[in-house]
Image (spheres, rainbow, N blue to C red):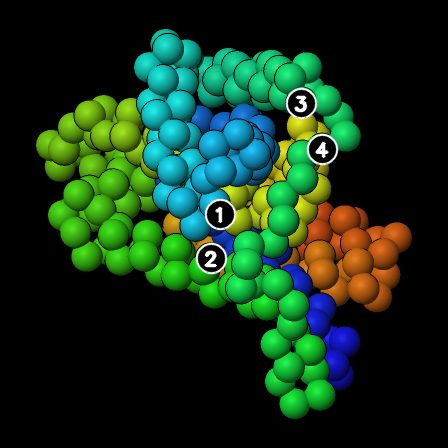
Amino acid sequence: MSAFIQYTLQGLAAGGFYAVSALGLAVIFGVLGVVNFSHGAVYMLGAVLAAVLLAELNVNFWLALVIVPIIMFGFGVLMERALVRWLLQLDPLYNFLLTFGLTLVLVEAVKQRYGVSGLPYQIPPGLGGQVTVGSVGLPTYAIFACLFSVVVCVAVGLLLTRTRIGMIVRAATEAPERTRALGINVGRWVTPVFGFGIALAGLAGVLAAPSRAITAEMGSNFVIILFAVVVIGGLGSILGAVVAGFLVGLVEAYGVAYAPAYAQIVIFIMMALVILVRPAGLFGREEIA
């Protein structure tokens, strides 16, 4: 039981990385209809930036949680303005290929600058060690990562449901055609929404930095699982992205613990079953599928 609780916590912590990133991916897909394959590379950039800021400017983890998403928001705005917007009227395949190519460029650029061995990043002071609950020792940082991810998802949810701007963005995300039919100019929200989605991926990268190996390739496997998350949750579904993120994190952790040879396979079997039973995903709508 002690081991099971530890695996559950590890799964929830990893699920937090998926949930925060998938939230950004879902918003981008909903408003722009863009399948952003570079989301994994942006997640990697978030972790790399956190490590570089710490090593060169002595910017600690807490400041990095604020500074890196702001930088990544600017990168997302630049990316949308310079590249993505010119292909929005074409087949979605073109933007998929564009973001795939951008991923290759970013990964190779990081390799050339920092090598392939990875960058060091220590667990922040105060978050190391374990918290003992009864006879169970739980990693302090895993508890923090899980709780922080939940707080971010709840905060984004409140932003999207309790503010006028948030409701417009949510409507444009989950039903863009109906939103346009109501006379709302969805186009004006494209750039900030894209930047916001990229910022969330960067934030997930900072959150993962103390517990994952920071390498140029760290986003490669991450983005594949991330697409499984958004398919399971439902393309364009904000709630689905969050729920599926934590669910996939748990499935992955249990798989690594009890059947390591099949850990990755189980995730995609689950995705296939969801598609067979509900093609739109757990929380998706049929017209989105």
> How far apart are labels 3 and 4 at the CA level?
7 Å
Q: Which residue bears the numbered disc 4?
A: 118
Q: Nearer the viewer, residue 60 or 102?
A: 60
Outermost residue toward the right in this view:
261
Q: Secondary structure at mark 3?
A: helix
In the rendered structure, find residue 114 and report the number of the disc placed on it: 3
Q: Mark 2 and 1 residues: CB-CB less than 8 Å, in contact?
A: no
> How far apart are labels 3 and 2 at the CA level?
28 Å
Q: Position of residue 18 (x, y in %)?
A: 55, 49
Q: Nearer the viewer, residue 223 or 34?
A: 223
Q: Which residue bears the numbered disc 2?
A: 149
Q: Nearer the viewer, residue 35 or 127?
A: 127
Mark 2: amino acid: Ser
Q: Mark 4 and 2 residues: CB-CB less than 8 Å, in contact?
A: no
Mark 3: amino acid: Tyr
User: Which is closer to the viewer, label 2 or label 1?
Assistant: 1
Q: Is residue 209 visible?
A: yes
In the rendered structure, find residue 47 and report the number of the disc placed on it: none
User: Which is closer to the viewer, label 4 or label 2?
Assistant: 4
Q: Earlier in the sequence, mark 2 or mark 1?
A: 1
Image-quadrant location for residue 75:
top left
